[in-house]
Amino acid sequence: MFTGLVEAYEPVERLFAEGPGMVLAIRTPELFDDVGIGDSIAINGCCLTVIRLADGCMEFQAGAETLQKTTLGILRPGDCVNLERALALGARVGGHLVTGHVDAQGQVTAREDDGQWCTMRFSAPTSLLRQMAPKGSVAIDGVSLTLVDVTDHDFSIALIPHTLSVTTLGQRRVNDLVNLETDLLAKYVQRQLETQNWGSSPSVPLSGGDRGER
């Protein structure tokens, strides 16, 4: 579990194919001096497991499904990514509860800069837009953000200078793809509404996923 508060912004050092998947080597931030093998790290909002620490880098394996459903598959050496360590029990939740399981990719449809400030619009699958509401929360590339407005086909967010300077969002332009994860509570509310008339029908479990995928 994560909070959507990016702790570091570091470059991808190396990428290489491994079977149907890929291994990513990302520079280890100085702040991450407590990271060990097996730890969970959110990379642009996608939870992956540290498999190796070497040459000042953290290495991760991303499977075929992860590469298909997130933007990790289009990363190149030199691209910077948002990083966040898993939430420690008892720590403050400054953003909102983020699982690190990316729901889908969205796309930047508009960007309006006003000095150092910025408003962006993003397209998203209809199924995800139904889980969004103005003033609610969404994670974009792993960044916890507040929704400004939501329509039937897109949504908008307002970005402060700090967020633009320390996350991938400052580099996003029209047509760029991003990772989206909707609010966990919104998912459960939608699920309850969908199943409230099932009566005594057997419940269908929510889809899950390994922490190393999506």
Image: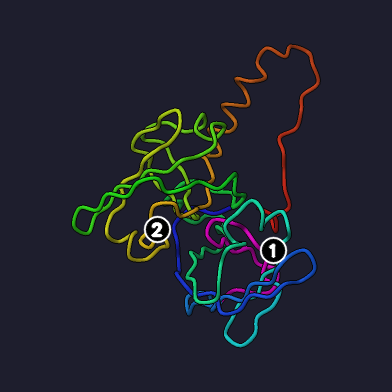
Amino acid at the residue labelled 2: Arg
Q: Secondary structure at mark 1?
A: strand
Q: Amino acid at mark 1?
A: Ala
Q: Foreground: 162 or 63?
A: 63
Residue 169 falls in image quadrant = bottom left
Distance between the alpha carbons at the discs numbered 2 and 1: 23 Å
Asked whether 27 or 115 is in front, the reply is 115
Start-end of magenta stretch: 34-50
Q: Front-most of 85 and 118?
A: 118
Question: How crowded is the residue under tag 2: few (<14 C-alpha within 10 Å), some, or many (20+)?
Answer: some
Residue at 51% in and 63% down = 84
Where residue 126 sits: x, y (%)? 53, 31
As drawn, which residue projects farthest toward the left?
A: 115
Corner quadrant of residue 47: bottom right
Residue 151 at x, y = what percent? 41, 29
Q: Is residue 27 magenta?
A: no
Q: Nearer the viewer, mark 2 or mark 1?
A: 2
Tell me what residue is drawn at x 47 percent, y 53 percent. 4
Residue 90 % position (x, y): 52, 54
Of all residues shown, which one is farthest toward the bottom? 55
Question: Few, some or many C-alpha atoms within 10 Å of disc 1 (few <14, some 14-19, many ≥20)?
Answer: many
Check the image and tell me how it is coloured.
rainbow
Tell me: residue 20, above or below residue 125. Answer: below
Find residue 172 and name its label: 2
* Residue placed under numbered mark 1 in the picture: 62
Q: Is residue 11 above or below residue 197?
A: below
Whichever of labels 2 and 1 marks the residue nearer the N terminus, that label is 1
> Tag 2, which secondary structure?
loop
Percent position (x, y) of residue 156? Answer: 36, 40
Name the residue rendered at 33%, 37% in the picture. Answer: 148
